[in-house]
Amino acid sequence: MKLIPVIMAGGVGSRLWPVSRETHPKPFMPLPDGENLIRKTFKRAASLGDVTEVLTVTNRDLFFKTEDEYRLVGRKELAQSFILEPFGRNTAAAVAAAALQVEQAHGAEALMLVLAADHLIQNEAAFTAAVEKAKILAAQGWLVTFGIQSQYPETGYGYIDANPDKPLEGGLKVNRFVEKPDLETAKQYVEAGNYFWNSGMFCFEVGSLLSELRRYAPEVMAEVHATLDQSRVAESGQNRYVTLEADAFGRVPDISIDYALMERSEKVAVIPCDIGWSDIGSWNAMSELTQSNNDGNRFEGEVLAHKATNNYVNSPERLAALVGVQDLLVIDTPDAVLIAHKDHAQDVKHIVSQLKSSGHEAHLLHRTVHRPWGSYTTLEEGERFKIKRIVVKPGASLSLQMHHHRSEHWIVVTGMARVFNDDREFMLNTNESTFISAGHKHRLENPGVIDLVMIEVQSGDYLGEDDIVRFQDIYGRADG
Amino acid sequence: MKLIPVIMAGGVGSRLWPVSRETHPKPFMPLPDGENLIRKTFKRAASLGDVTEVLTVTNRDLFFKTEDEYRLVGRKELAQSFILEPFGRNTAAAVAAAALQVEQAHGAEALMLVLAADHLIQNEAAFTAAVEKAKILAAQGWLVTFGIQSQYPETGYGYIDANPDKPLEGGLKVNRFVEKPDLETAKQYVEAGNYFWNSGMFCFEVGSLLSELRRYAPEVMAEVHATLDQSRVAESGQNRYVTLEADAFGRVPDISIDYALMERSEKVAVIPCDIGWSDIGSWNAMSELTQSNNDGNRFEGEVLAHKATNNYVNSPERLAALVGVQDLLVIDTPDAVLIAHKDHAQDVKHIVSQLKSSGHEAHLLHRTVHRPWGSYTTLEEGERFKIKRIVVKPGASLSLQMHHHRSEHWIVVTGMARVFNDDREFMLNTNESTFISAGHKHRLENPGVIDLVMIEVQSGDYLGEDDIVRFQDIYGRADG
């Protein structure tokens, strides 16, 4: 029985700003153990039995970052395919596209396991056991959900109302899905015992899923078919890359898989499970991953405290000091700091809205920006200068380019660079430097086998990112 | 009648950390109006009538910074003399040393006006009027204090109990000084009407002051005399520079002028005044200088708020966001952020103590360090690199030096540099760069008439500040 894990990396995680941002969203946030959620999710998926391919549905701007994370897990023998979205279009579109791809590659009897890229599961053994149960029901044609045993009356999750009277093999039939309840209702659910948190993970036999989708969400299916017909499909070895065509994808109804299908179908089952699940939905949830000290404070980074209790501070790069404060969340990043009361952790998303509506980049970008060839971090900007730390991956190169208004000075800190400056080509070794005058065509390559780390100092009257003329670009970004 | 303002720049202002630090203390903190307290104090002193010299008592490490501030006020015709302390030794020592210097330069009939470098006075006209009154009483031999009309029962200040029955010319005789009272006592003081806040400013005729000091504080006088006998005195034009000898100065009793003299003498008067005085003793006082918005928030810098009221945020360089918080002080600097409750503003000093006792540099240094030749700011440190922004004043030069383990790469952002690299000497213009290999002797000069601004990128295996061999230094710091 083939099992294809489908990792869905959709959400931005705006309640986890300022660490989570559009170009570096929640799945990529560093966790206290040094890993992140996307890597953990891939590892978890790859470790399941009968898995030969992992399919990821994500935004196309996150493709290279995601591949980098998977590479760190090191499971080259697995096929790692991608469906790349131009923008998020809710979960029904993503699940339908994934199902059609899996059917094409593996046939209608293949099973797919839909996983969120940004959930934490702390009990891997229990998870694996739950998946084994789900596979049995899915093979029988059930649309299988995973229901988390509710420990307390959480009002932030939807619930699954299951029928305990006629148990299925390893699971229960689902009566109905219910929206996030108020506290009173949530308490009744916990007491009743047959209500489970809806984890948003699913297991389907592809054929059954597609036939149910055609029945309950024919419009979604039609537009996803149309999108796939117009989309670019590239294959490289065992991997497939589907880049969804934007115009057609924009016509797919914007609806969740829960609304479109799960709440309508009669063939829905739930596997009750206790797998240490959390959707890390806010800084409160994130804080739980850090040990608290005697004052109830949880600190990541260098923090001093005086008469301060029950605070969470995440400040990996700078010193933070707390005096006489309680129940705060303090999140420090190189370009923004958040101070929120724990009772208002959900409201952090309003700051992101304010940033968006004012056109501020701090909802979008971190100081470190990832590119196909590596990354750059803006270290400092001032009058007439801008300083970047540039990391170029082994074998990678930047586009051949030219700037009208700025000179660039390059200092190699680690590794070796090959530099093209007009008609000269030369190597720059560690601790050496060169400079490119305004108006000169230039290109930078890492010919070595370790990362090239460079400091670039730009100087000049105008230092905007738009002062760039690209002549050649192996990533297809040439514009002149 | 000669009046010599004596500006006393002693305290560190640890309750205003992280902006105020030992090497950049409270008098130098930027205020919302773009000025700082030391510059305001000098300007105020220089604007008084009959002033031909301003004498400043300060730590020797703050000498160049202080001169730089005075230069910005631009009163070259005034003598600007300094007494430079190796360390703080309380106010009796400083006042006594200043009095002996003023006596020597201007005679025993000269008047001296003791001003704190870190107080704010918002009503300059009332201040000038109060000084005029003080001069009259001082000339009659009174030791004159300035008593602030208490607006409310402040428990953070000492009070002056004045005798309203036999008024002096423009002032009152002082009955006694009282320590910081509790709230009940403070309320009684405010009701009584003859209690004033002790502002810590004084006006003395130098002869009267010295004779009272010899009577009530003979030990202080003896040790200060001994210190001056062993101290270096340099003269340049109309300015005198007295560098106090450390060993002798360390033997002066560590006692305040209030304890040593004012509370004992029978000849103490007070000028009641309403001059818009504040000692800016905490972040609460500092926050008052910023206009509040409709939510009672006071913001310096870019701040977003959601359900946040009555907070003060000082974040000139980074975005700050508040969610669901009240009555907080948030102070952001490039290397440290403070979050304190307003009710605990006084406790900020405990953080500074913690930093000190743990050997952390953040109580001492900012990222910008001032030097006789200009300043440098550490922009970034990482593995194998350190980046500084260096500002060299016109005509100034750094010492001839050499590093064993690091190469330095210099990029001129503004101005012109003269570079000596082993036996080569050359000019480096704006947007040009050069590099100095490890082991090469080098020196940097600004031959121009505007500031030279450079980015220095250090690369190498070891980047500690102690990897420096100095060969020549016009500021006397050569060590090899």
Image (cartoon, coloured by chain):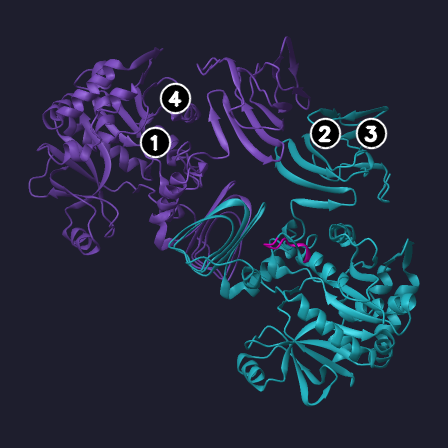
Chain colours: A purple, B cyan
Which amino acid type is marked by label 3? Lys
Which amino acid type is marked by label 2? Glu
Q: Which residue is mark 2?
A: B408
Look at the picture and state if A262 lies above or below A480: below
- The picture places residue A160, in percent across and down from the top left corner, at 16, 42
Which amino acid type is marked by label 1? Thr
Q: Which residue is mark 4?
A: A75
Look at the picture and state if B205 lies above or below A28: below
Which numbered disc covers residue A41?
A: 1
Q: Which residue is mark 3?
A: B441
- The picture places residue A33, in percent across and down from the top left corner, at 44, 39
Helix, strand, or loop for circle 4? loop
Look at the picture and state if B280 lies above or below A388: below
Find the distance from the CA under tag 2 to the CA under tag 3.
11 Å
Residues in magenta, as a range: B27-33
- Badge 3 crowding class, 10 Å Cα cut-off, few under 14, some 14 to 19, many 20 or more, is some
Is residue B437 found left or right of A120 in the rendered image?
right
**Tag 2 subunit:** B
